[in-house]
Structures are given as C-alpha cells and as structure tokens.
Amino acid sequence: MCGIVGAVAQRDVADILLEGLKRLEYRGYDSAGVAIVDGQGNMQRVRRLGKVSELAEALLAHPLSGGSGIAHTRWATHGVPSENNAHPHVSCGDLAIVHNGIIENHEVLRDELSRDGYKFTSETDTEVMAHLIHRELSKNEDLLSSVLAAVNQLEGAYGTVVMDRRDPSRLVAARSGSPLVVGLGIGENFLASDQLALLPVTRRFLFLEEGDVCEMTRTKVDIYDRSGTRVERRVIESDLDHDAGDKGQYRHYMLKEIHEQPSAVRNTLEDRLTDRRVIIESFGEKAADIFSKVKNVQIIACGTSYHAGMVARYWFESVAGVQCNVEIASEFRYRKSFVPDNSLFVTISQSGETADTLAALRLAKESGYMASLTLCNVPGSSLVRESDLAFMTRAGAEIGVASTKAFTTQLVSLLMLVAAIGRYNDLSEESEAKLVKSLRSLPSVIESALCLSDDIETMAEAFSDKHHSLFLGRGSQYPIAMEGALKLKEISYIHAEAYAAGELKHGPLALIDNSMPVVVVAPNNELLEKLKSNMEEVRARGGLLYVFADSDARLMQGNNVEVLTLNRVDDLIAPIVYTIPLQLLSYFVAIIKGTDVDQPRNLAKSVTVE
Ligand code: F1P
C-alpha cells in the first residue's frame, strides 16, 4: 500500500527520495508526490496521478534542490486517486506531511478544524492531520511536541512524517499501526515505510515501535514512546541484497521470483535440518519447550498466506496428529472464538505488517493461547517483533504483488513446523527422516517443474479470450487450486473460482460449457480415482480440461482434455510442487492479456489498513 520516504542531508535529496519511491512501487499505489524545502526556506511540492515515472519526468523538467524532503506513493482510501488527494499535504504553506494508514475520526476533526478557519483542498484524512499538527504548532511552537499532541487526538492507524519549512533541519515521524523505519547515514539520516526504499543509501536501520515518535536531524535521531519518554531502539544491520529490487534478465519481477524458488527454498532449509530431523531451535530458543506441549494449532493469515495455512491443516492432522484450525484474519479478529487447551497461535505473512493479521495476534495474546509463532519473510516486521516465536521464511525480497516464492517458502516452513510439533505427537522418527528427505529434494524437483514453462506458455493461449475459469483439487491440493485461482484473478483479471472437486455436483457443474476452462491439479494419490470421476463430469458437459498430473496418474490427452505431466513426487511435498505450474499459467495468461503483472490494479503488496 502507500509508501513513505524522507531524508535530511547536506546534499540535494530529490534523487534519493525518487529512488526510494521507485523501490516502493511494488507495494501498489495510484499517485505519487514529493515536497522539498530549498535553501531559502521555500516549500516546493510536486504531485502526479499515476506512476512514479511521471513524477520523475516532472522533476526532470523542473528539478528541486534542497536537503530536506518527504515523498509518498498513495493507495487511495479516503478520496479518489487524483493529484489533489496525492501526498504530501501542506498546511498553510508551512507544514508538509505524508501518511500511511487510516484516521477513523477524521470527519469530526475536519469539522472542528474548518470551524477554526482551516481550508481543505483534498478529501483525505491526511490533510486533517496536517492542519491538526499546524494548529498545535501555533500554540507551542515545537514540532515534536505538536506532533505528540496531535497524534494523541487521532483514532486509527498512521505512519507519518512531518516537515516544517521554517526549520527544515528536522523531520518528525510517528508510528501507530503502520510501519516506519529510520535509516542511519553518515551526516545524513532517512525515514521510510520499508527498508527496501533506503538500501542504496544505508544498511543500518532502527525500527520504530508502536506509539513511537521520532525527531530526526542530519546527525541525531531521538525516539520517544507514546508517553513522551525517551527510548532506545536497537540498530539492525540489514542483510537484504542491495539489488533485491532489480529484475535482472527477467521481463517481470514475478517471473524472476517464480524462477528463484529453488534457491529460495534452499535458503529456507539451510542450517535447519540434520540428516533425519528438523532442528527445533530454528523456531527459537523456547520452541522445544512450547512445542512439546502443543495439542492444537490455530493458524491465522490473509490471501495467499491463508492458502498456505489451509495446506498445513491437512499436514498437521494427517502427519503430526495435532488438531488444526485455519481462519482468515479479518473474520477471526471480529468474532468470539473458543481457545482449546495447549493451543499454539500461528500467523503467516510475507510482509509481517498485514493489519488484520496483526490485530488478530494482539487479540490472541489476550485470549489464553499458550504461545504465538509467526512465519514471516521480513525480519524486524511487526508480527516478528510481537510474536513469542518467529521463523523467517527467507524467500528474499518479493517485489511482485502476487506472491510466489513467499508462498512456497511458507509451505516449506509449515512442513518443518509440522515435523517439529509432530515429533511430540504422532510423527515417528522414521517418518520424520522421510519427510526431511522429501524437503531436501524440493529445490531440484521445483527446478524440473519450471521446465514445463514453454508448454504452459502455449496452454495459456486458450485462456486469453475467456472471462471465467474453474480450478479443481482434492485434499491438500484443494488449497493449491484456490491459490491457482487467486493468482489468475490477481494478475490477469479473469474471474477464477476454486472448488474442492467433490463439490462440483453441488452447484458449479451448472456453469460448465465450452467457454469455461477447468484447471485440475491431479497428482497420483489416494483421491485420484475420485478426481477422475469429477473430470468425467466436466468432460461429459463439454467443459475444457487443463490437467496437471504425474506420469503415474495415467491420464490421457484427448478431446477437450490437455494434460501436462510433472515428475512423480512424494505426496507430502506435492502441494508445493504443483503450485509452480499454476503460477506460470497465470503469468503467461497475464502476459497475453497485457496486464500490469507486477503491480495489478487495485492491489497492494503490504496491506497495512484493514
Ligand atoms: C497477505 C496478502 C498476500 C498477497 C498480496 C496482499 O499479505 O494477501 O498474500 O500476495 O501481496 O497481501 P501477507 O500477510 O502475507 O503479507
């Protein structure tokens, strides 16, 4: 969603801000803007509807000089995408502000500020914040205490940075519900909503915590907690690759990330397995003690991460012998739920900042769960910091909005978790050794699945003129069908629905005709014969079948049936492997349709508002 970059330096900061915004483009946005104070104390602001490249062009035509600035990519919540609604917002020509999040009491505050004579030029909740801080500043003349006083009047979520043209040597930032990170330079300092934005200028970061307010100059960073008490935050050296934001030889980040899966999975596994076991301590020092008591697992996640949780449910109950429930965070957080004894609360998130998942974790902490664990791809993110245990999926930076390598590494992490907990329940030493062997085979098995790329590219042509599609699977392949359908929807905008194949007769069969492609994930397992009957039901009604199967499945190519064959793999890891062709299918369909693969319309990479 929205992205923030800020800088105070001796040099001109326009290029640093612009590069930061480009690196945040993957989060999804509809407009962009920058405000810089020049050497004479003038506030200069440029905003554009559309891409950061349009803002860059505007800045090329009219370059901005100055060592203090803030910049933003906006994903509309209050008010349509437009130049007027784009950030930074300015109050009375003096204060500029950028903001991520949603202010829930903005209407009351807007009325109050209008009565005090403030004029509004946008429909945003952010302009309300700008005027509110300005009003405080006119009372006490200190930006830091004005921001503190203003945020105390806000309800909702914010990550915000404020700049005053009358004293551009300092920026003030505040965080509640939307992440902010300080980047430490030498004689210059930076702020951003995501460390990726600042990798070209620094690797040393301080993560602001909930309620923190920060005052930053070129040489000093002071952080205060919600009560105004000075606090220290740990400096973290980032190990993210500087070029994490580079597409390399690939046409799109998504394609690069699909092809990175063998190495991403290798990283996930590295140092975490012995020959026959999963190393429990990889989940944290307290993991063995906690896992030995677990009798129930509650998984909470959103979107693709939720699908990973759905697969894990099959594994937990069949492999570990441990009861497992999975629920979408936005539902869980608003209902009263039952907490069984010895229950582990597990969140899954590539970003670690998803507002609903974070709220669910906070609720769980008050609800009697034994402990919390997050499986996450971003070290230092909110979910990681607030959970008792954290396991990094180590997929590397994922830029494409539609998650690929983050998903498969989540599945790998979950299978390790199943083994670690299973050891204290139904998983024998022999079965764990077999599971470990299968995990180790994954990088090369995924490599072979990627070899189907050309055939899938040809298959994709059949989808380009279609408006609807169905995805079918059974057992642990059902959530994989759901993930396949989600991927196709997200990036090609073709309507796609997934069904557990046994549900066909209970409704969706009515939709089948020769304009409805039906994609089936059909590895040879104990449900294959049932699945074959479901496919016959589709074929008999003129439906078009596109089947991913293995050689042992003995499925014949024929009229209206196209079969692509994968190598036979152990059932346990089959959901991970069958994800690959479905990712490629969506990618190639989107290419033919000419959509924006890496930044699909209306979607965001990090969903920091509920
Ligand atoms: C959940 C999610 C992703 C999806 C997209 C938007 O986020 O739905 O699965 O790919 O990027 O958010 P997270 O909690 O896994 O970060």
Image (cartoon, grey):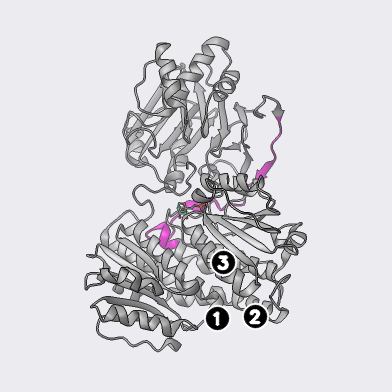
Q: Which residue corresponds to the image point at 49% horizontal and 55% vertical from the top-left? A: 398
Q: Position of residue 246 (x, y in %)?
A: 46, 54
Looking at the image, which is closer to me, 69 or 379? 379
Q: Which mark is residue 39?
A: none
Q: Secondary structure at mark 1?
A: loop
Judge left or right: residue 588 versus residue 177: left
- The amino acid pointed to by label 1 is Asp
Circle 2 sits on which residue? 434
Magenta span includes 255: yes
Mark in front: 1 vs 3:
3
- The amino acid pointed to by label 3 is Ala
Mark 1 to mark 3: distance in Å?
16 Å
Say if 25 sits above or below 185 in the image. below
> What are the residue bounds of the magenta stretch?
231-256
Say if 265 sits above or below 433 in the image. above
- The amino acid pointed to by label 2 is Lys
Q: Are marks 2 and 1 in contact (CB under 8 Å)?
A: yes
Mark 2 to mark 3: distance in Å?
18 Å
Circle 1 sits on which residue? 570
Looking at the image, which is closer to me, 11 or 516? 516
Circle 3 sits on which residue? 312
Q: Are marks 2 and 3 in contact (CB under 8 Å)?
A: no
Q: Is residue 405 visible?
A: yes
Q: Position of residue 589 (x, y in %)?
A: 31, 65
Magenta span includes 445: no
Q: Residues within 10 Å of mark 2 (few under 14, many from 20)?
A: some
Q: Quadrant of residue 547?
A: bottom left
Lower position in the chain sequence, tag 1 or tag 3: 3
Q: Secondary structure at mark 2?
A: helix
